[in-house]
Amino acid sequence: MRIVILLISLFISLAGLAQVRKQRAEEFYNQGILAMASGNFEEARSLLTRSISEDPGFAEAYSTRAAVNERLNDFNSALRDYTISLEFMPDQYEVLLSRGALRYQLNQPLLAREDFIKLLKLPAGETNTIYYRQSAHSPGTDQILTAQGAIQSQVYNYLGLIETQLKNCPLAIQYFDSAIRLNISEADYYINRAMAKQACAIAGADEDFQKALTLNPDHPIAKHNLASLSARKGEFNTAEQQLTEAIEADPLMLDPYLERAYFRLLRKDYAGALADYNQAIKLDRANPEIWLNRGMAKEKLHDLAGAYRDYTEAIELDEGFVKAWVNRGNILATQKKYTEAIEDYSAAITYQPGYGVAYYNRAIAYYRLNKMEEACDDLKKAEKSNYRVDQKVKEGFCRPIK
């Protein structure tokens, strides 16, 4: 009997202890929510971790910590917490939505698709959670929406984006059609559908971009893509004006600067192109192509020192960037630094042995140094690399040695 009483007492004590721990978990959780609402995300994460330590089965604490981890850009931890929360409670609509969106952001389209397909089978319910609308060809997320009301259309939108990424354009268009039926006033859905149509050369992209601009006259992505359509039709002045409007609508979009710079180069507005490349580099300093193109604009403006620096930066970002090696070699050759130019051309050939223009330019540099045998040899290699060599040049470089 004594043993029975002891066991009952022990059971009551353990049950009481478990209840105390659950209460402490709730307290830490509520404190974490308050810290999160105040923007103190590190503190919130610490409090939520303490809550989980007290109650390892507290599904809401995991999902809330996941949201905090997202705000701290700790995406892998966020994904792990969302998954743990769903293991405890598989049909949490908001958590499943958040995990699907994060999987899409982390370039896990197949896993994201699983989450969004499951969401279509679950009732949306009521929610006050804030989510971010995803747009095609725009980095990250662009506008805030609440899940309540708009969320079903957003699920279809994500599925459309995923199928576009997977090159399943007809299915993507069907999903965007569903999103639009649920929310006909959302400009992004028309843009995303237009991008899917473009990806598979399906007619109607232009009309969707125009519809997006009707709904949002300042939509930068619509303006940008209409400019691309105008350029493909040869309407370069119209394209440049549309790119200018896209830049005015969103000065932080990179592509419109690059495309407008290209059109300005075509019509020899080198100062305008340089201004665009300057802005592009402010937005993306790690892109060697932009440094190369800015260097070319500077060359046209006779800023050889500036061009040399830009080509050097491009090489430092990508050591195998053969165009930058050749262009920098050309600067050195222009300055009659032929030996140094030969070194740059040789570097380009090392990275791309069949690069005809590098052989041709190196041949000229050898010729300037009166190294006729090397010059003739490089000219022949340029020809073998399918680089067109004028016969008179070849005769001048490859004269018989007397």
Image (cartoon, grey):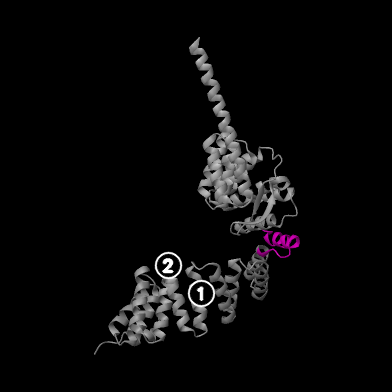
Q: Which residues are magenta?
A: 203-220
Give x and y (percent) for residue 74: 52, 51
Tag 1 residue: 293
The crowding category of the residue bearing disc 1, from other C-alpha atoms within 10 Å (few below 14, some 14 to 19, many at least 20), is: many
Q: Position of residue 195 (x, y in %)?
A: 63, 58
* Residue at the spot of label 2: 318
Q: Main secondary structure of the magenta part?
A: helix
Residue 388 x/y as whole percent: 42, 78
User: Counting residues from the N terminus, which is met first, the one under dot 1 or under dot 2?
Assistant: 1
At mark 1, the secondary structure is helix
**Amino acid at pointer 1:** Asn
Q: Residues within 10 Å of mark 2 (few under 14, many from 20)?
A: some
Query: Given contact means CB atoms under 8 Å apart, are the residues at marks 1 and 2 in contact?
Result: no
Q: Is residue 355 toward the left or the right of residue 193 in the image? A: left
Residue 274 higher or lower than 130, as above or below: below
- Name the foreground residue: 37 vs 330: 37
**Residue 93 visible (yes or no):** yes
Q: Which corner quadrant of the image does residue 228 belong to?
A: bottom right
- Residue positioned 42% across, 82% down in the render: 331
Residue 199: image quadrant is: bottom right
Which sits in the foreground, 228 or 337? 337
**Residue farthest to the top?**
1
Q: CA distance from mark 1 to mark 2?
A: 14 Å
Residue 358 counted in the magenta span: no
- The answer to which of 24 and 197 lies nearer the viewer is 24
Residue that appears at 65% across and 56% down: 192
- Residue 167 shows up from this direction: no
Q: Is residue 217 magenta?
A: yes
Q: Secondary structure at mark 2?
A: loop
Image x and y of residue 212, in percent: 72, 60
Amino acid at dot 2: Asp
